[in-house]
Amino acid sequence: MLTLEKNGDNFVEEKLLTGQRKLSDCIQQIAQQIGPGMTEKQGAAITQDILQSSGFGKNWHPPKIRFGSNTLKTFSEPSAPEIVLQENDIFFLDLGPIIADHECDFGQTFVLGNNPDLLRLRDASKNLFYLVQTKWSKEHLSGAALYEYAHSEAQKLGYSFVTRGASGHRIGDFPHHVHYRGNLMSITEPVQPRRWILEIQIHDQNLNRGAFFEDIL
């Protein structure tokens, strides 16, 4: 195992996986309460309430709640504050709270309405994640090879693949950065399971919208 895949003495793999599953469930609950006419600030309030009531503590990375054209923003870019979610629109949630001293990180895209292009974009982000995950599990890819494959597959679908701020990272007991601060995409050796977050962010320039999906490898 690479030294950068180490965890602290208090790391318990089942705590990591349980927290990740719980966060996924919370994101589904949050998405059900988000609707047309809302701002990201209102979405953030819903998010905070649900996470707190579910036992999550502070965030190890700031929550990213992106509505409409803000789905084109990369992780470090601030959202345009005036964006209001429309009846036929897209949004994603990227949350990184802590529970039981272990980090969680899950992100998913949702669509309001039945716009087929938005639905295709949403589904592509999730399908790409599982396509890349499957190839990694079968071929024991490095992080670099994994992202090269993801980029190629996104292009085949007609989407721009975004790596700025969405190039994967470590996960573990808090804080993982004492072991490694870099990204998954820069790793040139095969990576181990349950140590990394795979991030998939794609843009549809014609729609002026993006989609995002992430979970643990």
Image: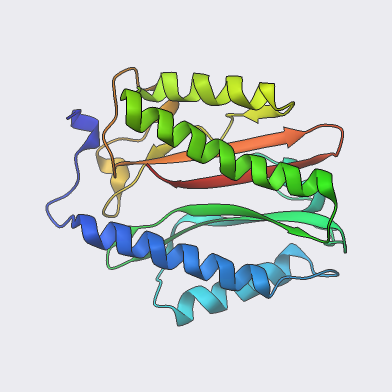
In this view, the residue in front, 171 or 116, is 116
User: Image point 51% across, 21% down: which residue?
Assistant: 149
Q: Position of residue 54 (x, y in %)?
A: 44, 78
Q: How many marks?
A: 0
In this view, the residue in front, 128 or 208, is 128
User: Image point 48% across, 54% down: which residue?
Assistant: 106
In this view, the residue in front, 186 or 210, is 210
User: Image point 73% across, 50% down: which residue?
Assistant: 79
For the question of whether residue 115 can be seen, the reply is yes
Q: Position of residue 107 (x, y in %)?
A: 54, 52
Q: Position of residue 167 (x, y in %)?
A: 50, 32
Q: Horizontal placement of 131 versus 20: left or right?
A: right
In which image quadrant can residue 15 be found? bottom left
Q: Where 148 falls versus 194 (above or below)? A: above
In which image quadrant can residue 2 be found? top left
Colour convention: rainbow
| Residue reaching furthest to the bottom | 53
Q: Which quadrant is home to the C terminus?
A: top left
Q: Position of residue 123 (x, y in %)?
A: 66, 46
User: Image point 34% across, 17% down: which residue?
Assistant: 188
Q: Where 121 falls versus 57 (above or below)? A: above
For the question of whether residue 76 can be seen, the reply is no
Q: Which quadrant is home to the N terminus?
A: top left
In which image quadrant can residue 158 be found? top right
